[in-house]
Image (spheres, rainbow, N blue to C red):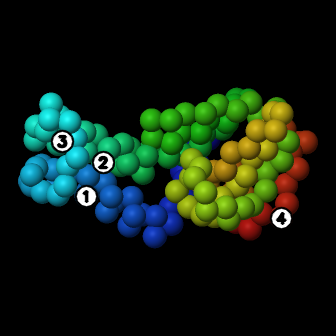
Amino acid sequence: MYFPSKKDLWLSITYWLFALFFIIPPIFFPNFGVWISPSFLDKPWIKIFTLSLIGLCLLWIWLKTGYTIKSDVLTIQYGPFKWTIKIAEIHSVTETKNPFTAPALSIDKLEINYGKFKTIAISPKNKTEFIDQLRKQNINIRTDKING
């Protein structure tokens, strides 16, 4: 079962502004701005390629962040990055508002503790259904009271 990431408005604006900032200006204004780079990199097509690649990576993260529960594995997709966690290794799932980086597009996250001292935070749109699906495969997962 696939669960898309919840997306905060402020993060939506930030991702799209940065993605467009990295893609559009280098194409239409390749000599704009201060570019501190070695002379062999001082070619407009290199700037366009490099900065557009960063912008496209941001869009990839924005469009392809989600969480899949399939058989006995939780797969976390965050653009080009991917994690797999065996559901049997999950000890607990708790809510967190931790603002630090995670494969999540919202500050309203679930912190998953698994394995020996491993933690990852994610932001499924439907947290209750997500936890229900995990607990169908591992009834030993501890949870606090999760609000929708």
Q: Secondary structure at mark 2?
A: helix
Q: Secondary structure at mark 3?
A: helix
Nearer-the-camera pick, 108 or 74? 108
Residue 47, label in figure: 3
Residue found at the far right of this picture = 140
Residue 55, label in figure: 2
Distance of mark 3 from mark 1, alpha carbons?
13 Å
Query: In the image, residue 45 lies at what x, y percent?
Result: 12, 37
> What residue appears at the point 10 percent right and 37 percent down from the top-left corner?
43
Mark toward the viewer: 3 or 1: 3
> What residue appears at the point 10 percent right and 41 percent down from the top-left corner?
44
Question: In the picture provided, is 15 more to the left or to the right than 70?
Answer: left
> What residue appears at the point 30 percent right and 48 percent down from the top-left corner?
55
Mark toward the viewer: 2 or 3: 3
- Dot 2 or dot 3: first in sequence order is 3
Distance of mark 2 from mark 1, alpha carbons?
7 Å
Residue 145, label in figure: 4
Specify the amino acid type for callout 3.
Answer: Lys
Q: Is residue 121 visible?
A: yes
